[in-house]
Amino acid sequence: MTRSTGLLILGAMSDPPPAPETIRDLLSYRIHRLANALSRGAARRYRRDFGVSLMEWRILALLGGFAPLTLRDLARESGLDKAQASRAVKALVARGLVERATGAQDAREVALRLSETGAALQHGLMQAARERDEAFRAALPPGTLAALEEAIRLLQAEARRQTPKE
């Protein structure tokens, strides 16, 4: 899909919007608010139905799909700093949902994976996440999902471009 096709689908062929005047007009702020709203809804459901925080859910989901992972890899993938990820993993290990093992490549590293109980919980969490995702997709008018996917891809690339390398 070309960029102009995506814009047509989203109805952006009219005059461009005026320049942002306040923080509420900034695209990044609006996306941040949307992400927070999506996270709040997910956090409530996962806490109510499964007894896990949103941070724990992300860790369980990542381990369910990509284990074994090191703490460093898990922190990077989840968008958490290493200390936050470490505390969450420690709590999940204490609850018997995550297991630690010596890394296959380096004995100093710890490889994390789901326990049998954790895998069962993660299966339910993923089902709930798929239901939420399906509802969000269904809220979009026909033809806009592809344009949204392309817009997200372009914005992620621009965000990476604007983020200095450490």
Image (cartoon, rainbow, N blue to C red):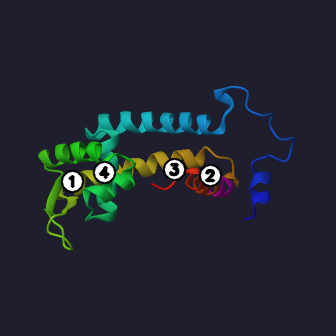
User: What residue did someone put label 4 on?
Assistant: 59
Mark 2 → mark 4, Cα distance in angstroms:
25 Å
User: What residue did someone put label 3 on?
Assistant: 134
> Label 1's element?
helix
Q: Nearer the viewer, mark 1 or mark 2?
A: 2
Can you say which quadrant of the picture contains the N terminus? bottom right
Where are the magenta residues, as a range? Answer: 146-151
Mark 4 → mark 3, Cα distance in angstroms:
21 Å
Q: Is residue 141 left or right of residue 120?
A: right
Mark 1 → mark 4, Cα distance in angstroms:
11 Å
Residue at left offset 37%, top offset 54%? 76
Q: Nearer the viewer, mark 3 or mark 2?
A: 2
The earlier-in-sequence mark between 3 and 2 is 3
User: What residue did someone put label 2 on?
Assistant: 155
Q: Amino acid at mark 1?
A: Gly
Report the front residue among 23 and 166: 166
User: What residue did someone put label 1 on?
Assistant: 118
Q: Are marks 1 and 4 in contact (CB under 8 Å)?
A: no
Q: Amino acid at mark 3?
A: Glu
Verify whether residue 149 appears in magenta: yes
